[in-house]
Image (tube, rainbow, N blue to C red):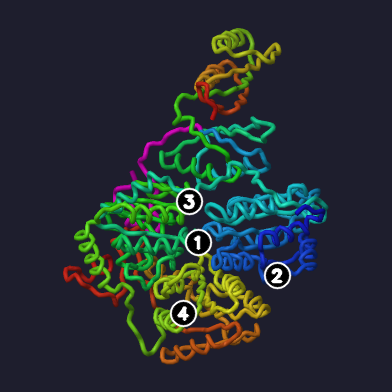
Amino acid sequence: MTKEMTGAEMIIQALIDQGVEHIFGYPGGAVLPIYDALFHQEKVRHVLVRHEQGAVHAAEGYARSTGKVGCVLVTSGPGATNAVTGLADALMDSIPIVCITGQVPTHLIGNDAFQECDTVGITRPCTKYNYLVKNIADLPRVLHEAFHVASSGRPGPVVIDVPKDIQFATGTYTRPKTFAHRGYVPKVKGDPERIQQAVAMMRNAKRPVFYTGGGVINSGRRASELLRELVRVTGFPITSTLMGLGAYPASGPQWLGMLGMHGTYEANFAMHECDLMICIGARFDDRITGRLDAFSPGSRKIHVDIDPSSINKNVKVDVPILGDCTLVLEEMLRLWTAQPGESDKPAHKAWWKKIEHWRARKCLAYKPSNEVIKPQYAIQRLYELTKDRDTYITTEVGQHQMWAAQFYGFEEPHRWMTSGGLGTMGYGIPAAVGVQLAHPGSLVIDIAGEASVLMTMQELSTAVQYRLPIKIFILNNHYMGMVRQWQELLHGGRYSQSYSEALPDFVKLAEAYHGVGMRCEKPADLDAAIKEMIAVDKPVIFDCVVDPAENCFPMIPSGRAHNEMLLGDAAENLDEAITEEGKMLV
Amino acid sequence: MMSTSPSTTSSSTSHYPSAHVAQAIETHTLAVIVDNEPGVLARVIGLFSGRGYNIESLTVSETEHQKHLSRITVVTRGTPMVIEQIKNQLDRMVPVHRVVDMTVTGRSIERELAMVKVRGKGDHRVEALRLADAFRARVIDATVESFVFEITGAAEKIDQFVALMLPLGLVEVSRTGIVAIARGPEGM
C-alpha cells in the first residue's frame, strides 16, 4: 500500500503491517506525535510500563515466549538511557526487539536540548543495529528493515531514533520489497560437506555428548523437535546451557541436566571426558567452559552456530558449521538415518555406565528440613504443583535463578525466560508481564529473590493495571544470596553489603499495589500456600521465607576445570579414597 | 596455545578464564567494504575499542559514489585467533559488505602517503633535498628556510625518510595510513 501520512502514522502503520499486536512503552515529549497516532487506532495495543527498562524486559519476555519480535516505544534522553539495560540484555541473549526512541527535532540535535542524548551513540554497542532517521523518506524503509534485522540471523535488538520533526513530517508510506543493506545476508544453510563430516564423526564417537544452547530455542519449535529426534536416534547424552533449557525435555532419559558453573556433576564430567562434543547453538561462554586450557581436553568438537563470530572465539573447534540450527539439524538427522552404519555400541554402553556412576553422586542433593524451607525444596514443590499446568517461568538473577534451572523441569521450549548473558537483576517481573500478556490464560511465575525483585518492583503496578495475574514467587533468604555465597567461599566470609536490610513487608507491598500478598515460613504449609497462590486470579507476591545460609551447589569454583567441582555436603561420596579436604575439590 | 600452567589460574579468585598468552602476534591489513552511511566508521572503531582490539592504522574514504560504498583499510595486530575474531565480528555487522584479509591473500600492495615539513638552512637544506630526491619525494611547498615533501611508498620507506629528516630540521609529519590493493586482474 502507498499512502501519504505523517511519520508518526507511518510508525503505527509499519507496526500493523508487521503484525505487531502489543507495544510496551512510556510516553514523553519527544514521542507525543506517535502516542497521538496510537490513540487513533485499535490494532496495536500499548502497554504502559512504569520504567523504560521494564518496557524492554517485558518485550523480551513477550518475544522469547512467542518467537515474535518484541516492540518498545520510549521517549528521548532518559527514556532512551533507561532502556539501555534492557537492550544490552537482549543483545547478550539474542532476543529480537525493535525499540523506537523519540529524539529532539533534527535542528536541535547536538545543541544539548532538553531531554536530548546521543541515543544512537549510546546504544551502538548494545544493539545489533541502530538508526537515526533524519529524512521522512527513509522512515518506511528503516521501520521494515529494523524488523528484518532484529529477527533474522542471530536475533537482537534494533533501535530506531526518530526526531520529533520527522514524526510530524508528511511523506509517502510504502512497504519496501527489497532490503537496502546488501551486505547483510545471514548464512542459514550449513555447508553440506561439513555436516557430512560431522555425522561421520558422530558415527565413530565412543564418548559423545550433545551440548546445546539458546540458539536451538531461537531457531524455533521445529529445531527442538529435530534435536529430540536426533538425540533419540543417536542415543547420545545431552546437556544444555541455561539459555537452552526446554529444547530437550528434562524428563528425557538422555538428559544430564544443565552444565556449567552450577551445572550437574554428570553434565560437566561428561563434557570433560567426552571424545566428541556436538555443540548446537551455544557459544562456549566462560560460565560454561570454566578454565579454558583444561576445558574438555580429549574431545573433538563440532560447533553449529548462525553467528560466525561465535565460532572459534573462546574454544578452537574441529568442525565449524555456520547455519541455522533447524536446517543443520534437519540435514544431520537425514544423513544419520539415511546412511547405514553401526555406532560403537559397547563403547556407548561403557560411556553410559560412567555417566550413571556420576549421576549416582546425586550432586543436587541437599539436607532436607522440617523447620525451615530449603530453597531447593520450594522450587521442587512449585514444580510438582505446576508441572501439569500451562506454565511459563521467568526469573531474576542469582541463587534462586540457578535453583530454578536445576530443580524446575522444563519439558518444552519457550517456557523459560531468564537473563543469561547480561545477568540482569530485575528482569523477572517485567518479563512475566510480557509473557502473561502474550499468554493470557497461562500460569506465569517469576521465580525471584528478595533483592532482585526490588529493582523493578514498580512493574507490579503494570500487571495490576492490565489485569495480568503474574505470580512473583520470592525465595526470601534476606541476602543477595549469590553475592553472599561468593563472599563465603572466596572472601573469607566477609559479607560486605550483601545483607538485605530494611526489607519491605512483601505482603503489605503487594496489597499496596492492589495485588495479593502471601507469606510462607514453614515447609509444612508450603503446598497449601502454593495451591492458594495458583488459584488467585490476580497478581501475587508470594514471600517464601527460606534458609538464609543455603548455598547453591554444585559449583565450579574460581578458575577451575569441569572436573574440579565443589559439591554440597549432602551429595553421595562414592570414592572412599577421597579425603574430607579433597571432597570439597572433586 | 593457552596458559598451560595450572598454578597461574587455579590460584585466581576470578572465575573468568585466564587471558590467552604466548601465541604469536601477527600484523594484518584488512580491507572492509561498507555502506557509506552516518556512523559507520564509529561502528567499526567502536568494535575495536569495545572488544580491546588494536588499530595500528586506519584509512577510510568513499570509493564507489553511486553505490554509496566506502573502503576502510585497517591495520591491526593480534594472535591468529583474535585476527579471525576481528574479521568475523566485522563481517557480521549490518552495513559491512565484505572483509578481505590482504595479509592472508598475500599478493597485495600497500602504500602510504606522507607530507613532511623540514626547516633548515645551508648544508642541511641541500642534504634534505638530496635525500628527498633519492626517496622520490616531491617538493610541494617551499620557502627560503623550509620544504614540504610529499612521499609515497610502503610504511617502512616513510619511516626511514622521516628518520633521516629528523637531524635535518624535521618540523612535522602528516601521514594517511596504509591503503592496500591486491595484485592481478581480479577485484575484491
Residue B159: image location, x then y, percent: 52, 22
Marks 4 and 3: same chain?
yes
Name which residue lies at 60% across and 57% down.
A157
Letter of the chain that mark 2 sits on in the rendering? A
Label 3 secondary element: loop
Q: Could you tell me how far apart the alpha carbons at marks 3 and 2 are, in whole angstroms?
A: 33 Å
Contact between labelled residues 2 and 3, with CB atoms less than 8 Å apart: no
Judge whether residue B27 is colored magenta.
yes
Q: Find disc 1 in the rendering and name its residue.
A: A220
Picture quarter containing residue A356?
Answer: bottom left
Residue A477 numbered tag: 4
4 or 3: tag closer to the N-terminus: 3
Q: Find disc 3 in the rendering and name its residue.
A: A306
Contact between labelled residues 1 and 4, with CB atoms less than 8 Å apart: no
Residue A8: image location, x then y, percent: 78, 58
Name which residue lies at 30% across and 53% down.
A202
Marks 2 and 4: same chain?
yes
Marks 4 and 1: same chain?
yes
Q: Can residue B10 be seen by looking at this rendering?
A: yes
Q: Nearer the viewer, mark 4 or mark 3?
A: 3
3 or 1: tag closer to the N-terminus: 1
Give, as a three-letter code, the residue at label 2. Arg
Q: Quadrant of the C terminus of chain A?
A: bottom left
Q: Could you tell me how far apart the alpha carbons at marks 2 and 4 are, in whole angstroms?
A: 38 Å
Q: Could you tell me how far apart the alpha carbons at marks 2 and 1 are, in whole angstroms?
A: 25 Å
Residue A284: image location, x then y, percent: 41, 55
Give, as a three-letter code, the residue at label 4. Asn
Left/right of residue A45 with respect to residue A329 in the rendered view: right
